[in-house]
């Protein structure tokens, strides 16, 4: 009876210790992946800000100073990103369709330094 009690206590203590070790390992792995994800998001955020700045510079060079430029992203399950760049300027809306297309094409020529990113450019119509 005494041996059975001792074996039961030893088994319970061993099971609890295994559970604590497994929980600690899972927590460590989750913490590292969260940190990696945060660093990646900071990296993309910096690239996106630089990209919007380059588009604003292009528009300013073409005479559309103080254009409103927003960039929205959708992160796909496979890790690729899809961006929608929306541009607003009152004078752009007065251009004919060919001139607007030419301006959108010029914006599309600006390189984004990461592959697997798709871009869609549009004008905000008011």
Image: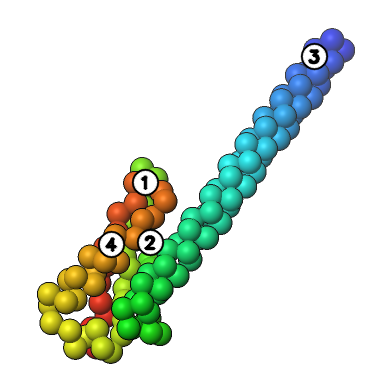
Between the C-alphas of marks 1 and 2, the distance is: 14 Å
Question: Can you say whether 117 is above or below 96 in the image?
Answer: above
**Where is mark 3, residue-wise?**
7
Residues packed near mark 3 inside 10 Å, few (<14), some (14 to 19) or many (20 plus): few
Between the C-alphas of marks 1 and 4, the distance is: 14 Å
Question: Can you say whether 7 is above or below 40 in the image?
Answer: above
In front: label 3 or label 4: 4
Residues packed near mark 1 inside 10 Å, few (<14), some (14 to 19) or many (20 plus): few
**Where is mark 4, residue-wise?**
108
In front: label 1 or label 4: 4
Nearest to N terminus: mark 3 or mark 2: 3
Asked whether the residues under the numbered discs 3 and 1 touch, taking CB atoms below 8 Å apart as contact, a structural biologist would say no
Say the numbered circle drawn on residue 115: 1
In front: label 3 or label 1: 1
Please tell me whether mark 3 sits on a helix, a strand or a loop: helix
Between the C-alphas of marks 3 and 4, the distance is: 72 Å
Q: Quadrant of residue 95?
A: bottom left
Residues packed near mark 2 inside 10 Å, few (<14), some (14 to 19) or many (20 plus): some
Question: Can you say whether 74 is above or below 33 in the image?
Answer: below
Q: Residue at x 58, y 50 (%)?
A: 39
In front: label 4 or label 2: 4
**Where is mark 2, residue-wise?**
73
Q: Residue at x 30, y 54 (%)?
A: 118
Between the C-alphas of marks 4 and 2, the distance is: 16 Å
Q: Is residue 89 in view? A: yes
Nearest to N terminus: mark 4 or mark 2: 2
Between the C-alphas of marks 3 and 2, the distance is: 58 Å
Q: Furthest residue to the front?
A: 61
Work out whether residue 72 or residue 102 is closer to the camera in this orientation and state it: 102
Between the C-alphas of marks 3 and 1, the distance is: 59 Å
Please tell me whether mark 4 sits on a helix, a strand or a loop: helix
Percent of width and height locating residue 11: 75, 19
């Amino acid at each position: 009876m005494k041996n059975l009690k001792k074996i039961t206590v030893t088994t319970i203590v061993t099971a609890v210790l295994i559970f604590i070790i497994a929980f600690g390992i899972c927590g460590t792995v989750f913490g590292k992946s969260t940190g990696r994800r945060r660093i990646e998001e900071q990296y993309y955020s910096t690239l996106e800000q630089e990209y919007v700045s380059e588009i604003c510079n292009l528009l300013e060079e073409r005479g559309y100073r103080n254009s409103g430029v927003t960039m929205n992203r959708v992160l796909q399950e496979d890790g690729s990103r899809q961006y929608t760049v929306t541009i607003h300027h009152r004078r752009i809306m007065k251009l004919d369709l060919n001139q607007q297309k030419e301006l959108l094409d010029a914006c599309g020529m600006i390189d984004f330094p990461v592959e697997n990113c798709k871009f869609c450019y549009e004008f905000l119509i008011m």
